[in-house]
Image (cartoon, helix red, strand yellow):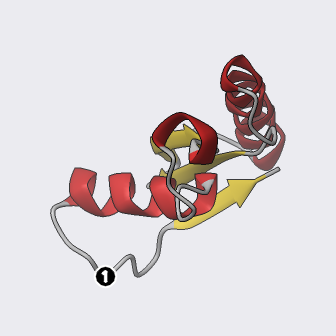
Amino acid sequence: MINDHDAMTFALAEARNALAHDDVPVGAVAIHNDTIIASRHNERELCNDPTAHAEVLVLRNAAYSLGRWRLKGESHKSC
């Protein structure tokens, strides 16, 4: 079971990965049934994509992971 502190710690670690490609250090995680199902960081510089924000990417991965686009009941944390 993941608590808010652990989720934010994981998101912060993910944010550090953005620094490797000179992006703004933002990380995000998606949580379903108290489990992290997706985690991403900003990839705008890496992908040359203005929409590659951590929050957007993590929602896309969460939807794919669950096999549905509607993310009712899931939560996400970003920092």
Could you tell whether 34 is left or right of 19 in the image?
left
Q: Quadrant of the N terminus?
A: top right
Q: Nearer the viewer, residue 42 or 14?
A: 42
Query: Where residue 10 sits in the image (x, y, percent)?
Result: 70, 31
In the foreground, 16 or 31: 16
Seen as rendered, the residue at the extreme front is 48
Which residue is painted at 62% across and 40% down in the image?
45
Q: How many marks?
A: 1
Q: Picture quarter containing residue 24?
A: top right
- Taking the spot 48% from the left edge, 68% from the top edge, the residue there is 74
Write down the quadrant of residue 11 in the picture.
top right
Secondary structure at numbered mark 1: loop
Q: Amino acid at mark 1?
A: Arg
Q: Is residue 73 left or right of residue 27?
A: left
Q: Position of residue 22 (x, y in %)?
A: 75, 28
Judged left or right of residue 69, residue 3 is: right
Q: Nearer the viewer, residue 32 or 21?
A: 21
Q: Position of residue 14 (x, y in %)?
A: 67, 30
Q: Residue furthest top?
A: 20
Q: Residue furthest left?
A: 67
- Mark 1 lies on residue: 70
Measured as percent of width and height from the top left, residue 3 is found at 73, 44
Q: Which of 25/50 is in front? A: 50
* Residue drawn at x 84%, y 40% as measured from the top left: 5
Q: Residue at x 23, y 56 (%)?
A: 64
Around disc 1, counting alpha carbons within 10 Å, would you say few (fewer than 14), some (14 to 19), or many (20 or more)? few
